[in-house]
Image: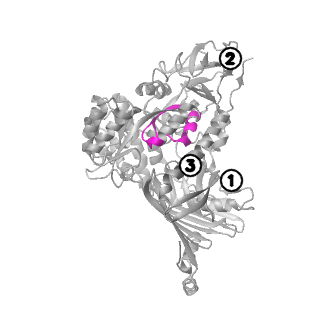
């Protein structure tokens, strides 16, 4: 819709970009002038069909202002954006202010004049001489930035532009179609934006090349009045992603029509936590059929020379939220099985079907039934309940589904509903894991029958929070700043640890995500990324120099750093008590899983113990140990090849030459360029039978 706002708004929008306020005389002149027409547009933000926020856009000529905010699971970004475009539709000024999902302050700016571009973002200040049309990529830009990128790229002959600070942007047209809304139909065209990130961003422009929607399998930003198209638009995003990954699978998955032998390797043995003598491994179909001499061979076999490297059983991520976008990247990192801790059940089911059919690459997925209480802060996955009977029925539904390993209880569940839920789950053979519901404590959940506690902060907050403090908000993260003052030898801490031991309760700490939350700082690569970050696309590199939490003062810095030290010490106490610690990321796995494993050396695990826990121990925990978890005759062919000895130096798992899952081989060096990732090591040669 359009209405008259007055020329003063245009001046203010320009001021927001340039940082120079208009003079009083200019404002008076603008007010007296004929008011231009301001074009405004509003958008709804939705997750799995539930509206969670909005995006409001106002545009006067070349000046654009945007307000963007949503809340899901008690958190979300709040951003104000101002953009000034030149006649070619390229930005000459751009500002973004506000805060990110976890509270980090955003104060980003960009300006270009006379061939010089300067910018400031969370990584620091930068500049570049510009001698050709180029597009600035806003680090913290709102979804409306896609309209700016899209319109400019459509004006470019080959739909590719150099990008600032680095790289390039490319626009690929997907399809044109019509969307029906409350006030009529809209003719639109969908596109893929390729360049700054690992995966394309799919979005839709209208006939005027203005933003109509940002689409993904679960998250949607759509023009007001078209919320009813939510499901169909998200289905298109699924299709585009599926087509991409099916093409990668068809091109790069090596499937063998005869047995294949990996020669000249040593095997990591989870039982001894060390390497075997040199050997070869023969795979037929999806199964390991024999382990022989390192140079063994037979007629009719494919051979791959392992060059003295190590075959490691496929790794597990015990805290995933698996998506189509992360499935193949996990495989390429040697992660062949994942416990999904909560998802859109229908979307996840479709993904599992595609992986099992072999049309997509991905790990084995063990499913959790996510059950959440209804509240202003609830997550929008799984089953949402409003009373005890609905909570009980959600458990019964999970039992009857027949494909869940456990139920997972979340923040907005009422603690008093949990005991009945646990009893019902255990009666049908499901385990129970979860967060500590708001206003409850870990001790209460242990006594109610939890088998496993999820996230170390969920346990530790109970030692520092007041009874009426609400963990459904960002407090469940910011209150960690209180941990440095906590005495870990106190009766409260010891009581919880005693209860965990007495009731055989495991913990899924998600160690690495707490490292990111507490130790990431603006302008510095966060801990744990140094071994791979220079191989990543520019957008990933910039994100790795961005703090997650709001850390404004030296006192904040010390408190959050001290909190991570306390988490490390607590995990060490748990290990010493014999509490089972499971290794999962809640960060998508892949490269982050490598960091998750690496961190446990801080609390006394050896590389061999870490690999044992992430392979055979994890498989046993998930009741899959007879099929996977080690490299043995008769087990499924799930393993990966690295050139070093990870039983001595765990970093060796980060250099993956080959991954095999179900007997299908993948060479990361062949596939990584499709994600904008520079390969880490060359692939071994496959020698076909004569």
Look at mark 2 in the image and give the residue it sits on. Answer: 301
Distance from label 1 to label 3 (Cα)?
A: 23 Å
Image location of residue 14, percent across then percent down? 58, 73
Look at mark 3 in the image and give the residue it sits on. Answer: 237
Residues 545 and 265: in front is: 265
Q: Are marks 2 and 3 in contact (CB under 8 Å)?
A: no
In the visual, does 273 lie left or right of 681? left
Question: Would you call the spot at circle 2 few (<14 residues within 10 Å), some (14-19), or many (20 or more)?
Answer: many
Helix, strand or loop under label 1: strand
Q: Which residues are magenta?
A: 317-346
Instruction: Tell me where residue 207 sits by quadrant.
Output: bottom right
Distance from label 2 to label 3 (Cα)?
A: 41 Å
Residue 428 part of the magenta segment: no
Distance from label 1 to label 2 (Cα)?
A: 44 Å
Q: Earlier in the sequence, mark 1 or mark 2?
A: 1
Helix, strand or loop under label 3: helix
């Amino acid at each position: 819709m359009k209405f008259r706002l007055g020329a003063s708004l245009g001046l203010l929008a320009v001021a927001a970009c340039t940082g120079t306020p208009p003079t009083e005389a200019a404002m008076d002149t603008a007010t007296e002038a004929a008011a231009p027409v301001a074009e405004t547009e509003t958008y709804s933000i939705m997750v799995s069909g539930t509206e969670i926020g909005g995006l409001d856009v106002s545009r006067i000529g070349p000046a654009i202002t945007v307000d963007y905010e949503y809340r899901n699971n008690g958190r979300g970004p709040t951003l104000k954006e101002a953009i000034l475009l030149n006649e070619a539709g390229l930005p000459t000024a751009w500002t973004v202010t506000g805060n990110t999902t976890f509270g980090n302050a955003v104060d980003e700016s960009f300006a270009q004049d006379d061939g010089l571009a300067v910018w400031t973002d969370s990584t620091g200040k930068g500049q570049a001489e510009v001698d050709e049309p180029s597009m600035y990529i806003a680090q913290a830009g709102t979804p409306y930035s896609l309209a700016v990128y899209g319109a400019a790229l459509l004006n470019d002959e080959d739909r590719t532009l150099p990008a600032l600070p680095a790289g390039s942007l490319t626009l690929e047209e997907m399809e044109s179609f019509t969307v029906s809304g409350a006030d009529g139909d809209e003719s639109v065209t969908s596109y893929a934006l390729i360049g700054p990130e690992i995966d394309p961003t799919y979005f839709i422009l209208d006939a005027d090349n203005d933003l109509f929607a940002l689409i993904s399998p679960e998250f949607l930003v759509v023009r007001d009045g078209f919320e009813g198209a939510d499901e169909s638009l998200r289905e298109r995003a699924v299709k585009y992603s599926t087509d991409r990954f099916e093409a990668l699978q068809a091109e790069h998955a090596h499937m063998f029509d005869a047995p294949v032998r990996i020669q000249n390797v040593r095997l990591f043995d989870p039982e001894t936590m060390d390497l075997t003598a040199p050997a070869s491994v023969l795979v037929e179909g999806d199964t390991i059929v024999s382990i022989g001499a390192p140079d063994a061979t037979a007629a009719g076999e494919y051979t791959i020379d392992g060059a003295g490297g190590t075959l490691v059983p496929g790794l597990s991520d015990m805290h995933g939220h698996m998506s189509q976008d992360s499935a193949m990247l996990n495989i390429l990192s040697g992660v062949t099985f994942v416990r999904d801790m909560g998802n859109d059940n229908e979307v996840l089911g479709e993904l599992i079907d595609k992986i099992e059919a072999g049309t997509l690459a991905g790990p084995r997925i063990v499913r959790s039934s996510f059950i959440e209480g209804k509240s202003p802060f609830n997550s929008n996955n799984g089953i949402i309940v409003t009373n005890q009977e609905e909570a009980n029925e959600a458990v019964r539904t999970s039992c009857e589904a027949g494909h869940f390993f456990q139920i997972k209880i979340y923040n907005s569940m009422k603690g008093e509903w949990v005991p009945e839920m646990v009893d019902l789950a255990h009666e049908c053979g499901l385990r129970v894991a979860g967060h500590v519901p708001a206003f409850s404590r870990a001790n209460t959940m242990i006594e109610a029958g939890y088998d496993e506690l999820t996230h170390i902060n969920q346990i530790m907050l109970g030692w520092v929070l007041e009874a009426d403090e609400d963990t459904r908000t960002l407090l469940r993260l910011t209150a960690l700043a209180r941990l440095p003052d906590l005495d870990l030898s106190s009766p409260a801490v010891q009581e919880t640890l005693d209860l965990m031991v007495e009731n055989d309760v495991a913990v899924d700490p998600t160690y690495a995500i707490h490292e990111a939350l507490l130790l990431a700082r603006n302008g510095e690569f966060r801990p744990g990324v140094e071994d791979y970050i220079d191989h990543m696309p520019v957008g990933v590199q910039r994100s790795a120099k961005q703090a997650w939490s709001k850390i404004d003062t030296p006192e904040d810095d010390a408190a959050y750093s001290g909190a991570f030290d306390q988490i490390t010490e607590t995990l060490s106490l748990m290990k010493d008590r014999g509490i089972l610690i499971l290794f999962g990321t809640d960060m998508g796995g892949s490269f982050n899983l490598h960091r998750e494993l690496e961190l446990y050396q801080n609390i006394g695990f050896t590389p061999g113990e870490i690999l044992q826990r992430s392979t055979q121990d994890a498989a046993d925990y998930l009741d899959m140990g007879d099929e996977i978890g080690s490299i043995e005759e008769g087990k499924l062919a799930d393993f990966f090849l690295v050139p070093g000895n990870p039983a001595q130096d765990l970093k060796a798992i980060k250099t993956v030459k080959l991954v095999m899952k179900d007997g299908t081989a993948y060479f990361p060096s062949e596939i990584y360029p499709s994600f904008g990732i520079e390969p880490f090591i060359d692939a071994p040669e496959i020698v076909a039978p004569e």
